[in-house]
Image (cartoon, grey):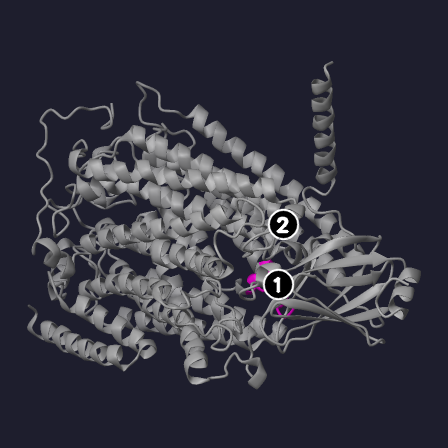
Amino acid sequence: MSRPGELAATPKRRFHAEVVLYTSLAGFLVLGGVIYGVWSKEAAGTVLLVLVGVFAGIVAGYLAFQDRLERTTARGSTEEAEAEDHDQYLPHSSIWPFEMGVGMATSFAGVVLGWAIFVPGVLILGHSIVGWIGQSRHRS
Amino acid sequence: MTARRRAGTIVAVAASLLLLAGCGNLGLPDPVTSQGKESRDLWRIFVWTAIIIGAIVYGLVGFVVVRYRRQRQAAEPGQRQYNVPVEIVYTAVPLIIVGVLLGLSIRTQGTVTSTSDDPDLTVHVTGFQWQWQFAYEGSDLTITGVPGKDPVLVLPVGQTVRLELESPDVVHSFWVPDFIEKRDLIPRVDNAIDVNVTEAGEWQGFCSEFCGLAHTGMRFSVRAVSTDEFRAWLANGGSEP
Amino acid sequence: MTVLDERPEVVPEPPEHSERAIGILGWITTTDHKRIGLAYMVTGMVFFLIGGAMAGMIRVQLARPEQDVISEDLYNQLFTMHGTIMLLLFVSPFALGLANYLVPLQVGAKDMAFPRLNALGYWLTLFAGIVMLSGFATKDGAAKFGWYGYTPLSDGVRSPNLGGDLWIVGIALLGIAGVITALNVITTVSTMRAPGMTMFRMPIFTWNLFVTSLLILMAFPVLTAAGVMLFVDRQFDGRIFDAAHGGYPLLWQHLFWFFGHPEVYILVLPFFGVFTEIFAVFARRPVFGYKTLVFATLAIGFLSVGVWAHHMFTTGEVLLPFFSFMTMLIAVPTGVKFFNWIGTMWGGQLSFRPPLVWGIGFLLTFLLGGLTGPMLASAPLDFHLSDTYFVVAHFHYVLFGGSVFGVFAAAYYWFPKFTGRMLNERLAWIHFALTFVGFHLTFMVQHVLGLEGMPRRVQTYTDADGWSGLNLASSIGSFLVGISVLPFLWNVWRSYRHGPIAGRNPWDGQTLEWATASPPVPENYDEPLPPIRSERPVWDANHPDAKATAH
């Protein structure tokens, strides 16, 4: 019996399934976009399909590149997983998302409703950005 | 039979006959154009396909729900988690069905959207917030709706009528349910459809693209008359001689 | 003997409601994916009630011919906001709330990858709803150009009211919020799965949310961009969609529906995931055809990006065969899923508890919407059916039968996990019966209304149209749907405090969220995870003699 939490076999590349997925998606969209463009000669749909396909391709490329980096772990065991999780920053609580939400909503609405709403909104938003980054830097 | 029961029977029979008449078109209005008849025939195929597939799937669900109810003292049920041949079949069969329906649709679409090189009559239909206007090419007759009086589009039976659809403001849509056809009126887009009306009659028309405050009231009607009557009507400046 | 039959020997302690910060401040500063998930779900339900009230008003106005209880202007605001609220402020937030709560738990993670960003997404959603609804308080009312806002009607000349601009602000905020959650789901799924959980051992619910998130990333930015373009036209005389000055009104429709069609799959795929889990658990069987389900979901996701112009067949300006082909094709993977669900229950031991009852209701209802879909995909048929009540019927059958039934199924299924208590089953049956009967009465007749000639978005009709009887029936049905939520709300309210204790795994669930306390501790797991060798690690641990087989 293997120990709890262990894979039967460690995968050679960590993001292999995702790379296949994003590459297929990119291929499907670009090919579909080209076929659509040639057949319909309609500009908006062609641009959208091809552009989204290119973005999917960028993600596929990035993950394939990540797979090659030696420091990528495979989360093959609980120890490796916990070591990686330790590097992550998962703060318990933070006021900054709330304030940033208020700032964004107020400043966006202020574009419509006028300076009296827009200016405070931008100030709140700016303050929340500073606070958010500050919290990350001090990992509080 | 009492008088009341007789009346009730008559109503019931009439209702069933009406339903059956509707049944001929399976819910669709009776088409009055040749294009509409093509679409109606396609509709019938789709509806019957849906009924058959629906019956099969409902049957399967009903069967499962009854047959596999939890028994009191049962062991764990079989834990089969895939069956490749079955899965292939229920992927391939829907693909084939869909392929057939698609082929039929494309064929009907070709017929219904085709426009002749030389229509017998052309009417410029303009939709604007919130009325319709019909301008008959080759004459200076223009019919415009006003609040409280919907305009009537008079057409000859048995002729190819080109309807050119334009809008100066927002998107509207020209819909005559009995034609089984609608087309949008879009600023900067020249849309045109051909209709061949096959019988005389009068039918309602609607704007069927939300176009603002008084979209609800933007209606018109279509009246089809014989070619002779139409010529007389047109020659008389758009009224009965 | 199953867990469902056993009585616990010792009455467990009522669940602890432990939190880090307490009270309102605790909720405002939370970054815990479980709390954020609950906030999304509760907020979504509130918007459901608001959107439902609007629907009730619409149906009151349409109950009899030539009524004027609701003016044309108000009516146009109501149907615009009803659509916007139901799709963007109810179903989507609720689904993303479920995702937030469950995806980390199902993959064995402590939280989402970006906890603060996650919280931001929630606040943006709430504030977007407030901004959009504030349109009703303005002089000329809320947005009233239909939830898909076609230009030129929605431009600054034809719809100059402030409510329209506030609507666009809401759209922008919601677009950002959606992308935030999608990023979180994708990153969490790709980088934080517990050891042993390969992609093909993830629960189907998580897979579906993963694909949903891909769709969000593809679709929402397009909507936001289109919203910005419309805003520029309205506020700064942009002339992008303005035909009189060389703009192209139809461009809006391409952009909007490029978002709009993936959007409806964004709304329904999460609930396909919910039902997949429910069918397996309540039949006491593994998911049938797991890989097929994954590939079908991916196929739906991929294809849904290429069907947008089937909403534009009547414009005369789109490539009909291409879109007919893609749209009909997408019916196939959905049909495959149906057979997989039936296959999951086949040979099982079905327990008709509330989640499964909603599941059966879903199969019976969604199927009808799935059968009318291909009709609309056929261009010549769509020429008659488009923009009529037939379409209204179709999309309510798939949206309500799929997503709304899914919302309730998820609520009954996971309420014990979220709160540690069970919901009352008799109230659940009353809720289901009222909803099911009310829904079908409301919308079945609308197929006929559309076929007979009733266009969408009309404030009234005449007696001579012959639509009066069916409209009255539909309105009566809508009243039933309205009251059907009452037993549910009462049930939730009462059971939260006084419901029977649920325990860790009251349904004998199969996936990792059932491996921990109800409600889970703040860091999710209070014990080491069971070994992950398949897509149902908790079942494997509890039923070592009932492993999945090939036949």
Residue occupying the point 35% across, 46% down: C407
Q: Is residue B194 left or right of residue C262?
A: right
Residue occupying the point 43% across, 32% down: C346
Q: Could you say which is closer to the camera, residue C434 or residue A81?
A: C434
Check the residue under mark 1 and report the chain it is in.
C
Residue occupying the point 11% across, 24% down: C9
Callout 1 crowding tier (Cα within 10 Å): few <14, some 14–19, many ≥20: many
| Mark 1 and mark 2 on one chain | yes
Q: Residue furthest right?
A: B228
User: Tag 1, which secondary structure?
Assistant: helix
| The disc label shown at residue C462, or none | 2
Residue on which the image places disc 1: C313
Q: Could you say which is closer to the camera, residue C463 or residue C276?
A: C463
Q: Is residue C310 magenta?
A: yes
Q: Is residue C122 magenta?
A: no
Q: Could you say which is closer to the camera, residue B135 or residue A21?
A: B135
**Looking at the picture, how far across and down is residue C522, in whole percent?**
12, 51
Q: Main secondary structure of the magenta part?
A: helix
Task: Please state, as top left, top right, bottom left or bottom right, where the N terminus of chain C lies in the image.
Answer: top left
- Part of the protein shown in magenta: C309-325
